[in-house]
Image: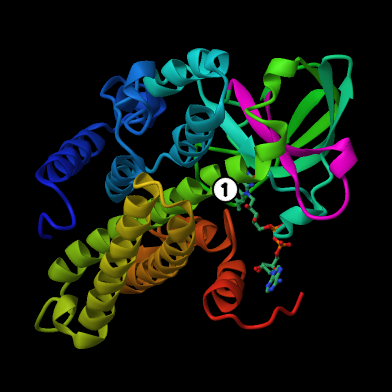
Amino acid sequence: MTTLIESDEHKALRAAVASFATAHTDTGDLWQAAAKLGYIGVNLPETYGGGGGGITELSLVLEEMGAAGNPLLMMIVSPAICGTVIARFGTQAQKQQWLPALADGTRLMAFGITEPDAGSNSHRITTTARRDGTDWLLTGRKVFVSGVDIADATLIVGRTEDARTGTLKPCLFIVPRDAPGFTHRRIDMELHSVEKQFELVLDDVRLPAEALVGDEDAGLLQLFAGLNPERIMTAAFAIGMGRHALAKAVAYARDRTVWKTPIGAHQAIAHPLAQAHIELELARLMMQKAAHLYDAGDDTGAGEAANMAKYAAGEACVRAVDQAVQTLGGNGLTAEFGIARLITASRVARIAPVSREMILNYVSHQTLGLPKSY
Ligand SMILES: Cc1cc2nc3c(=O)[nH]c(=O)nc-3n(C[C@H](O)[C@H](O)[C@H](O)COP(=O)(O)OP(=O)(O)OC[C@H]3O[C@@H](n4cnc5c(N)ncnc54)[C@H](O)[C@@H]3O)c2cc1C
């Protein structure tokens, strides 16, 4: 790759993260260890203990962690969504309280937008905030929210009472894990992942005025500021996982011999692996474009690129994992080789945070100007 796309600093960061992630076999304290080296808060402002970089650097870190077989799903949420939203729109007190701790890994924040009855249609969310004196009372339900058990707080997307119907006018609240009326129940997922998903109930959760992030009337702008990094980071997550699966498959194909040559000499095995590599590289290129636009302050341009990157990376990851399983034959389904579990994991990037179909809708409507079916 030329310096036009990735600087020498980026290449050095990539190499450092790769060797850290490969050497660090104890996943238990991986987050803390990565944070200590400045990897988790690399995108957060230097004045608040971060690295002063952007989503370009953060996505690079997550991709390399994933390529080494150690993806940190909460990087998509804690520094990328929550850290970005607070850094850009939070009050001075919120920045002081959260950013240094998110950067050094001592605190973690989850993010909850998905609701059981709204799903992909976030305009339909009904989690409602009503004023009670200077306090807010938050009521609603969320589903599939990752990492609530390990997060000190969850950034909850709701809407104010006077904006309960019509187009979405969201508002974002920081809800501490132990807030009275805030409960979480683990969803039994078929995923081998340290990060779990939860259903949340908010039953008149009383929050002080300071729990509202930024401006009540600028919620949509704030939300989008967080969602572009979320898509870019999900692309990084998917590319890392795809590379991990591909590397295992290539190593196996070079070695495994059942006729005269290693199976990797058969084009039926080699070509789909080459194709997977090309698709992952292409997805990364779009991810880098999206991250570059986002870091340059072009939220609108980044929106289209981030969606396309997430789409391309999700598809490339699913195909790379599928071909990796096939390459390993029976071993592709053993626990020992650890590829089969990626079949489920790779689907995450096709479904979340926005599904493949909703991205195709976005491109159909926003880019191509085609009419909507809904
Ligand atoms: C592992 C995992 C982690 C997650 N973590 C979080 C988290 O931390 N926080 C959070 O808030 N959420 C999280 N989510 C939720 C995720 O963002 C949603 O699952 C996703 O947005 C899809 O919503 P849904 O599951 O309700 O599907 P639905 O909206 O019910 O969609 C079901 C299917 O219908 C399709 N569909 C829907 N509408 C249309 C349409 N108009 N045109 C064409 N097809 C359509 C979809 O593409 C999909 O294939 C997570 C999900 C998973 C699986």
Indicate the position of residue 156 as horizontal and vertical percent values: 69, 34
Vertical side of 351 occupied by 230: above or below: above
Residue 165 among those drawn in magenta: yes
Instruction: Locate residue 169 relative to residue 280 in the image: left or right.
Output: right
Q: What residue lies at 62% left-to-right and 68% top-to-bottom?
A: 358
Q: What residue lies at 33% left-to-right and 29% top-to-bottom?
A: 26
Indicate the position of residue 138 as horizontal and vertical percent values: 83, 28
**Residue matched to label 1:** 224
* Quadrant holding the N terminus: bottom left
Residue 245 is at least partly visible in this image: no
Q: Dot 1: few (<14), some (14–19), or many (≥20) neighbours within 10 Å?
A: some
Q: Secondary structure at mark 1?
A: helix
Choose top left, top right, bottom left or bottom right for residue 162.
Answer: top right
Vertical side of 273 occupied by 302: above or below: above
- What range of the chain is rendered magenta? 152-174
Residue 363 among those drawn in magenta: no
As rendered, which of 206 and 90 lies closer to the eye? 90
Vertical side of 152 occupied by 39: above or below: below
As rendered, which of 246 and 233 lies closer to the eye? 233
Q: What residue lies at 44% left-to-right and 70% top-to-bottom?
A: 315
Tell me which amino acid carries mark 1.
Answer: Phe
